């Protein structure tokens, strides 16, 4: 089972362009990432630049409209993610509990949908385009 752990760092919605994490926090996080890798469950992990450097594309009137960051209405924003291959939701939660996060941080855990979980008609519709599959 694949799970994505989404880091929602407290206060990141107001971070200015170029904001960098504290080196001591990076050291702790890299040790955590190494533990995930050593356990053989880490598929990928990346941090994200603050929303002030991003953009959102909305489709409210049926056309694409671009909004540059920061996003005033955003209360929680993603700061990074881990993609894990684990045996269960409980295992993903246990790994999230081990993260050296700060008191104001939150990790959201979401299972990745596999095409085999969808009804047969949806699987057929998706069969022509299997991204990342040879």
Image (cartoon, rainbow, N blue to C red):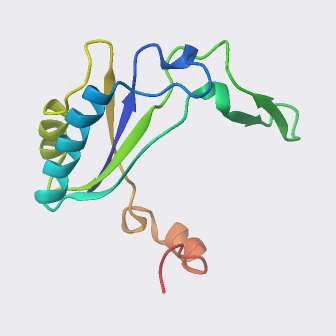
**In the image, residue 89 above or below residue 132:** above
24 or 58, which is in the foreground?
Answer: 24
Total numbered badges shown on the rendered structure: 0
33 or 88, which is in the foreground?
Answer: 33
Q: Residue furthest front?
A: 23
93 or 60, which is in the foreground?
Answer: 93
Residue 134 image point, x, y percent:
48, 87
Residue 9 image point, x, y percent:
40, 22
Q: Residue at x 67, y 21 (%)?
A: 70
**In the image, residue 11 above or below residue 50:** above
Q: Residue at x 47, y 80 (%)?
A: 133
For residue 108, what is the image quadrant? top left
Left or right of 92 on screen, residue 119: right
Residue 13 image point, x, y percent:
54, 18
Left or right of 35 on screen, residue 29: right
Residue 78 image point, x, y percent:
47, 31
For residue 64, what is the image quadrant? top right
Which of the image's four quarters has the N terminus? bottom left
Q: Residue at x 15, y 30 (%)?
A: 97
């Amino acid at each position: 089972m694949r799970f994505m752990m989404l880091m929602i760092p407290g206060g990141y919605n107001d971070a200015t362009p170029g904001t960098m994490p504290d080196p001591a926090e990076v050291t702790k996080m890299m040790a955590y990432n190494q533990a995930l890798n050593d356990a053989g469950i880490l598929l990928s992990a990346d941090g994200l630049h603050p929303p002030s450097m991003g953009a959102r594309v909305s489709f409210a009137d049926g056309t694409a409209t671009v909004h540059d960051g920061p996003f005033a209405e955003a209360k929680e924003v993603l700061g990074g993610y881990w993609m894990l291959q684990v045996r269960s939701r409980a295992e993903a939660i246990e790994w999230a509990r081990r993260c050296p996060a700060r008191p104001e941080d939150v990790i959201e855990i979401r299972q990745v949908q596999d095409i085999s979980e969808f009804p047969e008609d949806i699987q057929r519709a998706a069969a022509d385009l299997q991204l990342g599959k040879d």
